[in-house]
Image (cartoon, rainbow, N blue to C red):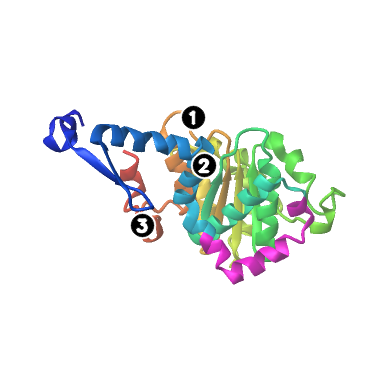
């Protein structure tokens, strides 16, 4: 960059042509400084931030605006109780998750603690329930009451929505504990109906060598052809990037090339080396 100032062109005058046709010559270096300063004079940090967001997600926003079928489907969700109690940022988050689940069959909600991931996820569950999907929700046992109270027949504030999902625990996926239930999750979720799997505290399944990870992958995820996976975690990365890689692999049923067609990721294992 310093070499640019040593070139003869850097010492020449810059001719400024105004709207009325008049001209003025100024030192080129001073002209460049003035132009750089205008960037910060004309645009606030907030405006620059919004510009960055639009460049990153603009196509997604435009796709939603130009997709009448998606808007029709969302119209049904907008009539639900759960959707209407969400804050605006939660509504936008739910719609974004739904869009990603439709396009990629997987998504992760990584909002910080206290931002209402549970209710956002309930709105997503309601949307896919309206689409005819069965929902299996996996969570730590200590969170069972947190999820169970919103199911249908629990007289919650969402009773009108008749939220329906099948709750099992992360620890059920070891030592054949699923077999102890009369309504075994692995059998219940190997029928030919489309599924939505919601995994709360998904960072607990970050180790792809663990027994529970292996059982989830082989006995539930890989036995279903039409399945979508929603992960919830405020801390998806604990030790290394391999944590998030292994959670991403849950979304594609363990296929290392599962992101190739839609995202151009040839091999997810190789990408995280």
Q: Count neighbours of disc 3 (C-alpha within 10 A) and say few if under 14, some if 14 to 19, many if 20 or more.
A: few
Counting the numbered discs, the total is 3
Residue bearing mark 1: 238
In the image, residue 194 lies at what x, y percent? 59, 64
Residue under numbered circle 3: 260
Packing grade of label 1 (10 A; few <14, some 14-19, many >=20) is few
Q: Earlier in the sequence, mark 2 or mark 3?
A: 2
Q: Main secondary structure of the magenta part?
A: helix
Tell me the quarter of the picture where residue 189 sits.
bottom right
Quadrant where the C terminus sits is top left
In this figure, which residue is indicated by the disc labeled 2? 47
Mark 1 or mark 2: whose residue is earlier in sequence: 2
Q: Residue 100 magenta-drawn?
A: no
Instruction: Give the alpha-carbon distance from disc 1 to disc 2, as whole Å.
Output: 33 Å
The quarter of the image holding the N terminus is: top left
In space, the residues marked 2 and 3 are separated at their CA atoms by 34 Å
The segment highlighted magenta reads: 62-84
Q: Residue at x 75, y 39 (%)?
A: 146
């Amino acid at each position: 960059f310093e070499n640019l100032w040593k070139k003869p062109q850097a010492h020449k005058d810059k001719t400024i042509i105004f709207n009325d046709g008049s001209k003025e010559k100024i030192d080129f270096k001073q002209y460049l400084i003035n132009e750089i300063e205008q960037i910060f004079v004309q645009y606030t940090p907030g405006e620059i931030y919004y510009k960055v967001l639009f460049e990153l997600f603009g196509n997604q926003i435009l796709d939603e605006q130009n997709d009448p079928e998606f808007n029709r489907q969302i119209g049904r969700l907008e009539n639900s109780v759960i959707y209407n109690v969400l804050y605006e940022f939660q509504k936008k988050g739910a719609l974004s998750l739904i869009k990603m689940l439709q396009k990629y069959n997987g998504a992760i909600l990584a909002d910080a603690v206290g931002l209402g991931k549970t209710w956002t996820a309930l709105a997503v569950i309601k949307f896919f329930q309206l689409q005819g999907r069965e929902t299996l929700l996996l969570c730590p046992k200590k969170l069972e009451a947190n999820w169970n109270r919103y199911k249908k027949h629990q007289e919650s504030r969402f009773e009108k929505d008749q939220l329906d999902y099948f709750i099992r625990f992360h620890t059920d996926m070891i030592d054949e504990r699923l077999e102890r239930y009369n309504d075994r999750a692995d059998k219940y979720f190997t029928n030919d109906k489309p599924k939505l799997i919601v995994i709360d505290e998904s960072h607990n399944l970050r180790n792809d060598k663990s027994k529970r990870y292996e059982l989830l992958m082989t006995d539930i995820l890989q036995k279903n052809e039409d399945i979508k996976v929603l992960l919830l975690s405020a801390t998806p990365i604990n030790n290394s990037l391999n944590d998030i890689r292994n959670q991403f692999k849950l979304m594609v049923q363990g296929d290392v090339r599962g992101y190739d067609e839609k995202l151009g990721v040839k091999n997810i294992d190789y990408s995280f080396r």
